[in-house]
Amino acid sequence: MNTAVAEKKPRLTTSAMIASIAAEGQRVKAAPFGKALVELAATRPDIVGMTADLAKYTDLHLFAQAYPERFFQMGMAEQLLMGAAGGLAKEGLVPFATTYAVFGTRRAYDFIHQVIAEENLNVKMCCALPGLTTGYGPSHQATEDIAMMRGIPGLTIVDPCDALDIEQAVPQIAAHQGPVYMRLLRGNVPLVLDEYDYRFELGKAKLLRDGADVLVISSGFLTMRALEVARDLAADKVDVAVLHCPTIKPLDEAAIVEAVRYRHRLVVVAENHSIVGGLGEAVASTLLRHRVQPAGFQLAGLPDAFLDAGALPTLHERYGISREALGARIKRWLD
């Protein structure tokens, strides 16, 4: 009798929590936020790092290793995290407070509003898993965080596209006087903007490429998707411009108006956020107030719904923000 036992192959699993948005073979940089903060803190002894039990999952563990005496682990208590960050800011320090975006906004909103923003304290809130960057379902998908934070007076909001955006944003938000909320991409983050002679400037939008048929106004990793779609549609003789808006508040209204006025082309706002209260509505308001009427206007964001759990590629396709789905939507709107 043959008693040989077949060798079991290891089961391959992917965590929906820390899944990467990078495509297979795409250039990435590991932990750009953590590395940029460590580098900046070498010359800024006033910078401290804080987290609510999520240092590893916001890349703040690199700061903790480099500057253990300037690192504060607050436990699973986001309200305490934001309240303590406000207290440290009152003592002249510059706290970088990290957690997941859902916890930093939903659970700690009142503390951000009353403790930090009302007194214009110098707290930098860097929150991971924004929008649909995790497959863990509504409990961890911060699809409404920008809508919530836009309503807080004096709060600056940053939604970086890639590793380069994050690296360059860190010293600028540290230098900015006042509270900042930055949507954080962590782990192996795609690197795309270095191909476009790009430099992050707080409060400024950047036209990455021009085009006669469509203007995509985007933020976050949807700018990466827009650039991919622009290359794809070029094969179909569709000319796509991409205007990247890494700062959601204050919005670069002058750049948006300039890009839309006197140009007869479809305007599409693409964002990793609900169509309610995000970049799309901010752009629409800007155009209306400046009496600028585009040839057409569409929102390519996430639906006003509680989204499903699952694998990110499946969810991005389902909700229209994958490369293929976004390209198909734009072609349909052009018909």
Image (cartoon, rainbow, N blue to C red):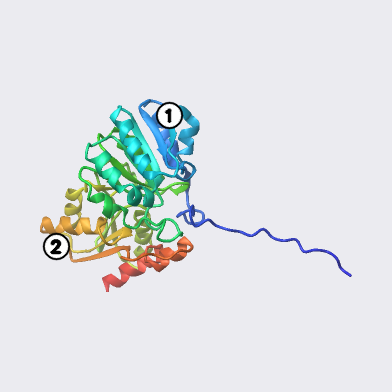
Q: Position of residue 289 (x, y in %)?
A: 11, 56
User: Which secondary structure, mark 2?
Assistant: loop
The residue at the far right in this view is 1
Disc 1/disc 2 C-alpha distance (Å): 51 Å
Provide residue 322's location: percent of width, then percent of height.
40, 63
Most foreground residue, 11 or 161: 11
- Count neighbours of disc 2 (C-alpha within 10 A) and say few if under 14, some if 14 to 19, many if 20 or more: some
Q: Is residue 213 above or below residue 51?
A: below
Q: Which residue is mark 1?
A: 70
In the rendered image, which quarter is residue 275 located in?
Answer: bottom left
| Helix, strand or loop at mark 1 | helix
Residue at coordinates 35% horizontally, 38% vertically from top-left?
170
Depth order, front residue of 14/290: 14
- Please determine whether, in this image, residue 59 is positioned above or below residue 107: above
- Residue drawn at x 35%, y 65% as measured from the top left: 233
Name the side, left or right, on which 53 lies relative to 254. Answer: right
Left or right placement of residue 116 versus residue 257 in this view: right
- Say left or right for 72 vs 267: right
**At 29% from the left edge and 43% from the top edge, which residue is drawn?**
112
Count of numbered marks: 2
Amino acid at the residue labelled 2: Gln
Q: Residues within 10 Å of mark 1 (few under 14, many from 20)?
A: some
Q: Which residue is mark 2?
A: 293
In percent of width and height, residue 194 lies at 38, 45
Amino acid type for the residue under numbered disc 1: Arg
Q: Quadrant of the N terminus?
A: bottom right
Please indicate, yes or no, whether residue 243 appears anywhere in the rendered image: no
Q: Quadrant of residue 330?
A: bottom left
Left or right placement of residue 67 versus residue 181 in this view: right
